[in-house]
């Protein structure tokens, strides 16, 4: 299989991950002001499996589909109003989170420990973006924004980080052995 075929397969897997994020976003525990969703687990999986470049592409594709009005965000919502609404900061925070997670693992290793560290960092990035935007968009005090948009998600976020690390590393290895993913630029240089 040549490099172009592998690239095409990587793009297909990237598009599938955008769909996975949309599906997992519908797994919701509705707590105000910000629900707990499965989309953060999907973001961690995207970064762990696809790395920085394709993981970021999958999140950008997911956000573009949602911004266009397709109901792929939590609780079957969609449109720009969701992105600029009180919980939109979490969505925007997924972009730097997935890139930094993937980049970190590309520079270290795609092992459970490194993936757990990366996913914890990514969780914190998304929570910080989301909490700051929640404070601004909902005109809340810092204390209320942190209490409603950050603190309740720490334990759940660590559980999701562990799940994304464990599942992601296993799936990544299987996809690479099936030649469905290109090695990342950094891992390709290390093995050359």
Image (cartoon, rainbow, N blue to C red):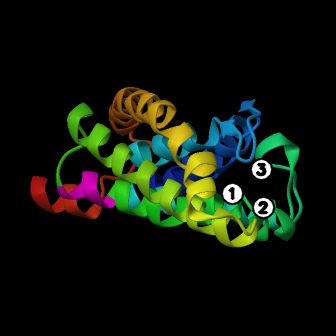
* Residue occupying the point 31% across, 61% down: 103
Q: Residues within 10 Å of mark 3 (few under 14, many from 20)?
A: many
- Residue nearest the viewer, comparing 98 with 128: 128
Q: Are marks 2 and 1 in contact (CB under 8 Å)?
A: yes
* Cα gap from disc 2 to disc 3, whole angstroms: 9 Å
- Measuring from the top left, give residue 15's x and y in whole percent: 64, 52
- Measuring from the top left, give residue 139's x and y in whole percent: 73, 69
Start-end of magenta stretch: 103-107
Helix, strand or loop: magenta stretch: helix
- Measuring from the top left, give residue 117's x and y in whole percent: 27, 43
- Residue nearest the viewer, comparing 134 with 66: 134
Q: Which residue is mark 1?
A: 62
* Cα gap from disc 2 to disc 1, whole angstroms: 5 Å
- Residue nearest the viewer, comparing 162 with 19: 162
In the image, residue 148 sits, relative to residue 140, either above or below, namely above
Counting residues from the start of the chain, the first of labels 2 and 3 encountered is 2
Give the numbered dot on residue 73: 3
Helix, strand or loop status at disc 3: loop
Residue 152 appears left or right of 65:
left
Give the numbered dot on residue 65: 2
Helix, strand or loop status at disc 2: helix
- Residue nearest the viewer, comparing 30 with 107: 30
Residue 153 covered by magenta stretch: no
Residue 180 appears left or right of 152:
left
Q: Are marks 3 and 1 in contact (CB under 8 Å)?
A: no
Counting residues from the start of the chain, the first of labels 3 and 1 encountered is 1
In the image, residue 41 sits, relative to residue 67, either above or below, namely above
* Cα gap from disc 3 to disc 1, whole angstroms: 9 Å
| Rendering quarter of residue 185 | bottom left
* Residue occupying the point 67% across, 72% down: 136
Residue 137 appears left or right of 142:
right
């Amino acid at each position: 299989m040549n490099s172009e075929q592998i690239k095409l397969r990587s793009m297909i897997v990237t598009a599938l991950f955008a769909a996975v994020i949309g599906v997992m976003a519908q797994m919701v525990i509705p707590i105000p002001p910000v629900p707990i969703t499965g989309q953060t687990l999907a973001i961690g999986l995207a970064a762990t499996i696809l790395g920085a470049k394709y993981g970021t592409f999958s999140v950008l594709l997911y956000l573009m589909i949602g911004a266009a009005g397709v109901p792929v965000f939590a609780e079957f919502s969609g449109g720009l109003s969701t992105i600029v609404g009180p919980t939109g900061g979490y969505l925007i925070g997924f972009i730097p989170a997935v890139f930094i997670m993937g980049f970190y693992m590309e520079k270290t290793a795609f092992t459970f420990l490194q993936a757990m560290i990366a996913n914890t960092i990514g969780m914190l990035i998304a929570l910080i973006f989301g909490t700051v935007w929640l404070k601004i968009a909902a005109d809340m005090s810092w204390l209320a924004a942190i209490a409603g948009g950050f603190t309740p998600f720490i334990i759940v976020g660590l559980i999701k980080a562990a799940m994304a690390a464990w599942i992601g590393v296993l799936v990544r290895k299987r996809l690479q052995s099936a030649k469905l993913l290109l090695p990342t630029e950094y891992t390709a240089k290390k093995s050359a």
